[in-house]
């Protein structure tokens, strides 16, 4: 993509060969994908002996309140092709060997799968507002590091997408379905270019013996060839 940009090449439409098909080649087309964002949150309080209430600020309590609030906050109601954005806690850790001493800090990691209603930047702001409000009330401090695996994207069904649908129907006699299922994909590197994902079946995806049949490969090649003929 960097090479093409440097060459001043403009891409009008792209087909990404992700294994988007389910039971039969061409039965599903991805017209979008949810974004994925990971975060590591560290809450800092004030350590102290649990017998002396008021001498410590418990980061565990604050972290628990934050997790509860994040889990009970409805991020959105989803879109036509994408489910509601969802936050899941993936790890919690307190580095404390004592049973009666409040620790200095507590941390948690979470992942958010978000739909096309959000950019990662706006999602970060929303999450940070929730965390800041609770941390301020509890007189703690926090640090959060985000890592965005991919932004959400969606291509509204257009003439190219409907053309591909007709080609698949002609070759396979299947009426393909549009969806945005699955995790992130290589499409995330294409920015805002209109695109779809059409490829082999995903029944053995990421398995040790990932494979495909020759007949599926030939069928997909025929679909691609007809798409090129129709497009140009």
Image (tube, rainbow, N blue to C red):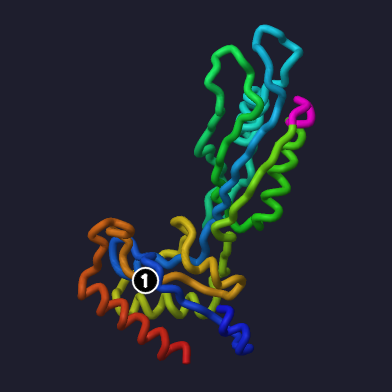
Residue at the left extreme of this rendering: 214
Front residue of 90 and 14: 90
Q: Which residues are magenta?
A: 135-140
- Work out which quarter of the rendered image holds the N terminus and state it: bottom right
Q: Is residue 47 left or right of residue 136?
A: left
Check residue 226 for magenta coloring: no
Neighbour class for label 1 at 10 Å: few (<14), some, many (≥20)?
many
Q: Residue at x 41, y 91 (%)?
A: 229
Q: Residue at x 26, y 62 (%)?
A: 210
Q: Is residue 229 above or below residue 23?
A: below
Residue 91 x/y as whole percent? 51, 36
Q: Is residue 90 above or below residue 46?
A: below
Q: Is residue 50 left or right of residue 34?
A: right
Q: Is residue 182 above or below residue 5?
A: above
Front residue of 32 and 57: 57
Q: Residue at x 57, y 84 (%)?
A: 4
Residue denoted by label 1: 199
Residue 152 x/y as whole percent? 58, 60
Q: Quadrant of residue 58?
A: top right
Residue 179 x/y as whole percent? 46, 61
């Amino acid at each position: 993509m960097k090479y093409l940009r440097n060459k001043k090449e403009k891409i009008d439409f792209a087909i990404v060969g992700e294994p988007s098909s389910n039971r039969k080649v061409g039965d599903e087309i991805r017209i979008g994908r949810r974004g994925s964002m990971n975060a590591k949150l560290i809450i800092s309080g004030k350590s102290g002996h649990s017998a002396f209430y008021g001498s410590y600020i418990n980061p565990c309590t604050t972290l628990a309140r934050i997790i509860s609030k994040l889990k009970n906050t409805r991020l959105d109601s989803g879109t036509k092709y994408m489910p509601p954005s969802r936050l899941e806690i993936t790890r919690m850790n307190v580095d404390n060997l004592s049973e009666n001493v409040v620790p200095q800090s507590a941390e948690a990691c979470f992942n958010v799968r978000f739909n096309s209603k959000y950019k990662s930047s706006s999602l970060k702001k929303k999450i940070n507002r929730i965390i800041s409000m609770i941390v301020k009330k509890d007189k703690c401090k926090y640090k959060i590091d985000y890592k965005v695996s991919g932004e959400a994207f969606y291509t509204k069904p257009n003439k190219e997408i409907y053309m591909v649908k007709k080609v698949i129907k002609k070759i396979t006699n299947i009426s393909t379905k549009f969806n945005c299922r699955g995790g992130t994909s290589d499409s995330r590197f294409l920015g805002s270019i209109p695109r779809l994902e059409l490829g082999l079946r995903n029944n053995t995806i990421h398995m040790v013996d990932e494979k495909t049949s020759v007949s599926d490969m030939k069928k997909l090649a025929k679909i691609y060839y007809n798409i090129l003929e129709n497009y140009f």
